[in-house]
Each structure stands twice: as C-alpha cells, then as structure tokens.
Image (cartoon, rainbow, N blue to C red):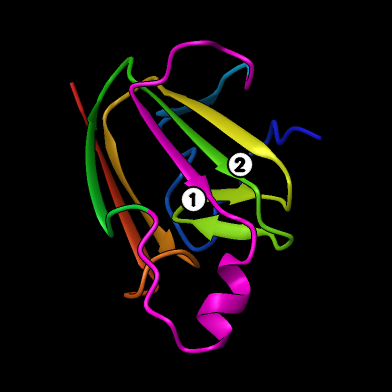
Amino acid sequence: MVALAIAACGSDAGRDGALVVEDPTAVHADYEYVIPLGTGARFDAGEVVEILPGEMTVRVGEVMRIINQDDRQHLIGPFFVGAGETLTQRFAGAGEFTGICTVHPSGEFVLTVEE
C-alpha cells in the first residue's frame, strides 16, 4: 500500500502550496530514509533511535522518500506514513514546516524548503 496524502499534524503545511505529493514509485529521490521494522517497539523500550535528522533543509524541486517498513504508522513533521507504506514528496515552494516526529529522539521535525 502506498501513501499519497499528507497530514498537517500541527503544522502550516499546505498554506502556501509548498508541499506536493509525488508518485511514490519515482526512481530518483534526493533524500531517502527507511524506517525499519521494529522501530516503534525500540522507542517503546527506551532505545534512542534516530532515523532522520530533527531539522532538515531542502531546495525547491528536490524529492524526499520515506519508506516505512515498521508495523506502526509514523509522523514526520507534516507527513503521515502508514505502516508498510512509502511517501515520496517533491517540494514545490519555499516555506518552513514543523510537527511531531515519531522517529527522532527529540519528538519534533523541522523542514525548511529554500528556493
């Protein structure tokens, strides 16, 4: 199953149209992160797991892919990635997007998209 929608979990995503969901089967991704099976359980057990940085700066036109192999859904800033799903995101406009991050020890994710 493939996620083709984003959730704006407490963020300003979508206000200026800077986030555009791409075909998740696109070959090229400038940034790719894999959330391994068992990640949620590792967090529950108190392990420090860092899948991606808590803050990230990308450029308009770049693509990020998040592959969730875990049996749990995860939030990464404005993005929701269901269990076993892949999200591929092309950044269409500048802006800053923040939100909860369930795969970073800080619990937060800040994404800055620059021209």
Nearest the viewer among 7 and 65 is 65
Position of residue 37 relative to residue 93, above or below, is below
Secondary structure beneath dot 2 equals loop
Horizontal placement of 102 versus 62: left or right? right
The quadrant in which the N terminus is found is top right
Instruction: Name the kind of residue labelled 2 in the image.
Output: Ile
Residue at (54, 77) in percent of width and height: 42
Q: Which residue is mark 1?
A: 78
| Residue 6 - label | 2
Horizontal placement of 96 versus 66: left or right? left
Instruction: Name the kind of residue labelled 1 in the image.
Output: Pro
Residue at (42, 61) in percent of width and height: 99
Circle 1 packing at 10 Å, graded few (<14), some (14-19), many (20+), is many
Please identify the quarter of the rendering in which residue 4 is found: top right
Nearest the viewer among 37 and 25 is 37
Sooner in the amino-acid sequence: mark 2 or mark 1: 2
From mark 2 to mark 1, how far is it between C-alphas? 7 Å
Q: Percent x, y for residue 77?
A: 44, 55
Q: Percent x, y for residue 22?
A: 57, 19
Horizontal placement of 106 versus 20: left or right? left
Q: Most prominent secondary structure in the magenta stretch? A: loop
**Residue furthest out toward the top:** 27
**Residue furthest out toward the right:** 1
Secondary structure beneath dot 1 equals loop
Circle 2 packing at 10 Å, graded few (<14), some (14-19), many (20+), is some
Magenta extent:
24-51
The quadrant in which the C terminus is found is top left
Residue at (71, 36) in percent of width and height: 3
Based on the picture, tell me whether residue 34 belongs to the magenta stretch: yes
- Residues marked 2 and 1 touching at CB (< 8 Å): yes
Q: Percent x, y for residue 21?
A: 57, 25
